Amino acid sequence: MTALVEGLREQWLYPKWYSCVTTPKRLKDIANESFTSKTQTHIIVTTVLDAQVLWVPVTDEYEELQWASFSVEYGRPSGRNNVVPWIKLDTTPPLIPPQSIPKVPDTITEKIRKLARIKHKNIPVKLLVGDNKELKVFEVDIDGDDIAEKIEFAKVRDLVRFLRHNLRSGMGYKLQGMFLIWGLDDIEFDTSVEFLKPLVHRSRFYPDEYFYPTTCMEFLSTTTGNEIVMLIHPDGTRYRVSFEDLPKDSTLRALETVSFDIYALGLLTDCPELYDPRTRRWYPVTLDVRNIMDIRFSKLHEYPRLQNALDHTDVSEFDWSKDSWRFSGHFHGNEINWRIVSTSTGQTWMNRSFTYVTPKGQNPKDGLDRFRRAVASIVPPSRLGGLEDWLEGLESTLRERDTSMSTDGPMTLEFP
């Protein structure tokens, strides 16, 4: 793989991760820039005690040559799922520097010239992944401008490697003289093969706990078991799962040992069935999200099964003892707009606000009693601070005005 490191053209380098460029157009642009730049710095990579060391020549204030040294590590920063290479520069102990600045080998110059001559056209495509029961293979339908092809795979490993090609290499997939590009959002899975999604979205999706058929032959020989329930529990800033109606010795129990981040949890919940390789059986999964009903996640819409489960969960089953809550309300005309706020985070419960409309002409006491019952139907009054103080303040104000629960002007009472 050819890659050019970004950020090394700065006057000073610092110990940190540096990303690498592999896309053909960007490689071509950088290569062309290197031949027109007035400033070129020849760097050296040597091996010291089995470790690679990068030497960068610098000139001090007296115009004397000095060398900055950094240890070189190839990999990727924590949290990066792509495998497009990065390098990490770190400090080194005092080392004996090179004696002179070397001449750039002709092979490197020629390599850069080849990059500058790249002729390349990327074709955006959409992929539909399914299976062919007759041929006993997985199929990927490729659809884009000037191309409509089908590729077959017998092994899950090869299929996933193909689907992750753009993510792994940063370059298009060459087919029929064209370079095909796609992103994760361009891949659609048939319902029968949705188990592949976590494997494509993550380079390693819990290989010791998440199981799946390794070949299409195995996939087509599987059976379906009973429906099971996946209960989701908060675990600090992460999440755990447990199962009901699942045999105690099922290999799926391995998932109960994992602490998932929210993205991994979303990928797992998007699988309508989970696979037990010991019995070669798929178990349809129902989600129980009562313990995470107040989850806040801006990308929740990317995980439709999780979002649907949350949308259809009965709020009366929410565990209010997990936090303490306060009431916040605003009275205007004959409407009370109110919400439930966490005293620990300041966040609104489930990001929801409520509107209560009072009948016109109703006396304050009756109107507030009905509103109090409406609030109690959602949250136990014993768990909600500030409600009674707010209602007393509103009732007092209404009596001073000698008016009903319907008023022409705005009136705001916020409990701090």
Image (cartoon, rainbow, N blue to C red):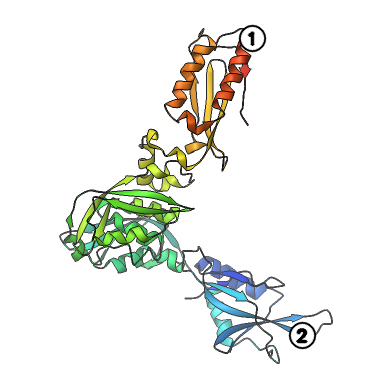
Q: What element carries label 1?
A: helix
Query: Where the C terminus falls, by quadrant?
Result: top right
Q: Is mark 2 on a helix, strand or loop?
A: strand
The image position of residue 12, as x and y in percent, is: 71, 72
Mark 2–mark 1 Cα distance, whole angstroms, equals 85 Å
Q: Which residue is drawn at 49% across and 24% down?
A: 355
Crowding at mark 2 (Cα within 10 Å: few <14, some 14-19, many 20+): few
**Above or below 2: residue 129:** above
Which numbered mark, 2 or 1, is in the foreground of this view?
A: 1
Q: Earlier in the sequence, mark 2 or mark 1?
A: 2
Residue 187 visible here: no
Disc 1 residue type (three-letter): Arg
> Disc 2, disc 1: CB below 8 Å?
no
For disc 1, the marked residue is 401
Q: Residue at x 72, y 72 (%)?
A: 11
**Marker count (numbered):** 2
**Above or below 109: residue 404:** above
Asked whether, in this view, residue 249 is left or right of residue 4, the answer is left
Disc 2 residue type (three-letter): Leu
Q: Which of 231 and 100 is in front in this view?
A: 231
Asked whether, in this view, residue 55 is left or right of residue 186, the answer is right
Q: Residue at x 53, y 21 (%)?
A: 336
The image position of residue 373, as x and y in percent, is: 45, 21
Crowding at mark 1 (Cα within 10 Å: few <14, some 14-19, many 20+): few
The image position of residue 79, as x and y in percent, is: 50, 62
> Residue 83 has which mark?
none
The image position of residue 247, as x and y in percent, is: 22, 56
For disc 2, the marked residue is 65
**Above or below 415: residue 191:** below
Asked whether, in this view, residue 275 is left or right of residue 165, the answer is left
Q: Residue at x 63, y 74 (%)?
A: 34
Residue located farthest toward the right when viewing the structure as drawn:
62
